[in-house]
Image: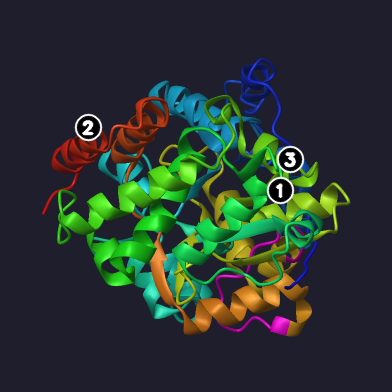
Amino acid sequence: MKFSRRAAVAIVGVAALFGAAACGSDDDGDGGNTKDVEVFTWWADGGEKAGLDGLVSTFDTDCADYTFVNGAVAGGAGANAKQVLASRLQQGDPPDTFQAHSGQELTDYINAGQIEDLSADYKTWGLDTAFPQGLIDNLTVDGKIYSVPANIHRANVVWANTKVLTEAGITEDATTLDQFIANLEALKAKGVAAPLAVGKDWTQLMLLEAVLITDLGPEKFTGLWDGSTDWSSADVTKGIEDYKTLLGYSNADRDTLDWTDAEKLVMDGKAGYQLMGDWEAADLDTKGFKEYSYSAFPGNATAFQWLADGFVLPKGAKNAEGTRCWLKTVGSAEGQKAFNTKKGSIPARTDAVATDYPEYQQSAIADWKKGTQVPSCAHGAACAQGLQGALNSAVGKFSTDLDVETFQKALVAAASQFIKK
């Protein structure tokens, strides 16, 4: 088993959040201070804040004529920030730039005419050749590119408490679902309260996606998001049944927990495993927890389920040139190194030097290059926010009633409503 330690985000309450957004823009009625660049994110604490600080340090050097203004909104793994952002965009008060998951999640902003085309900037800055072609293809909408990715995260990773596993006689990573279920059964027999730690809505969607990658394979899984794979198929039914089996080994309070709460079950020895993105390595490092291992979700070894945090240029931004300097820094080799070494993610650029990064990230860089890249809907790479919300609602209901037939019908209905073939 492998070991790694990094840093990540601390989720804080919603109450403090809207006040944080209110102080983001410095507009004095004359367009504000044009040296200020308000950067709107949900990176408010932990390793995510540390990564942002690293990026800001590079920005301060490369863009000395401009001043970084932190518009971060904490809580909800980005959900709270998106609510505040939507309100500001509707009011015609955009920040100079905002964080958004690269991929289909951006289509809502593109269709609303809220963000600028950055294709010409890509060529000017050399990003069209610095990023892998597959990523460029995923970023391109109708021939145009609208965001600059700061990183690549892997979603389909299992994190384990090695002490808990050893005490249950588990010495190897499971490579199949049958092996994984056998390990969960061994943990249950040993008296572990929740063999598999699970959180609410979007974390459940992540787990469902990982199971579907195993049962459908990467190609058919990807087809779920463009309409070429039928959500009513027998393969999807099997995936739902396997997902239901896994939920049977999880904590009863899963619908009330955020991902960090579920993570704490693993840290406290009350759970053996958790499926979570590789920002978990960062969080475990921040909290000083060392007795953990990581592996691809069983059956996902050849599939790298990706998501990317990117930045955009909103239409009507008060400081477009300052934003462009920020975006150039985000895409630069120096900026990506400063950010990702602290964030737990890997750089989007192809010229990154793997040995500059800690152990987990070195393995992720290798897996990104050799694996089959499949997008995450839970984190916006595969689907826009409408479908994402519908699926989160469906998994939340299924968590309560565990009705496979009704759940699959809800998935089919959501796909029919939001996926255009």
Report the side of 98 relative to 121 (left or right): right
Q: Depth-wise, is mark 1 or mark 2 nearer the camera? A: 1
Left or right: where 275 falls relative to 361? left
Specify the amino acid type for callout 1.
Lys
Q: Nearer the viewer, residue 228 or 161?
A: 161
The percent coordinates of residue 408 (x first, y second) are 22, 40
Q: Is residue 310 above or below residue 306?
A: above
Q: Give the magenta part as a residue range.
A: 341-354
Residue 270, numbered circle: 3
Q: Write the residue at 35% across / 26% down.
A: 401
Q: Is residue 37 visible?
A: no
* Residue 405 pos. (x, y %): 21, 37
Which badge, 3 or 1, comes first in the chain's sequence? 1
**Mark 3 vs mark 2, CA separation in Å:** 31 Å
- Quadrant in the picture for the N terminus: bottom right
| Residue 20 spot, x, y in % from top left | 68, 23
Query: For the view shown, which residue lies furthest in the front direction?
Result: 189
Residue 346 within the magenta-colored segment of the rendering: yes
Which residue is under mark 1? 190
**Residue 82 in the figure: left or right of residue 274:** left
Q: Is residue 393 magenta?
A: no
Q: SS of the residue at dot 1?
A: loop
At a point 22% along the width and 34% down the height, the residue shown is: 410
SS of the residue at dot 2? Answer: helix
- Which circle's residue, 3 or 2, is located before the other in the chain? 3
Secondary structure of the residue carrying numbered label 3: loop
Q: Main secondary structure of the magenta part?
A: loop
Mark 3: few/some/many CA within 10 Å (<14, 14-19, 20+): many
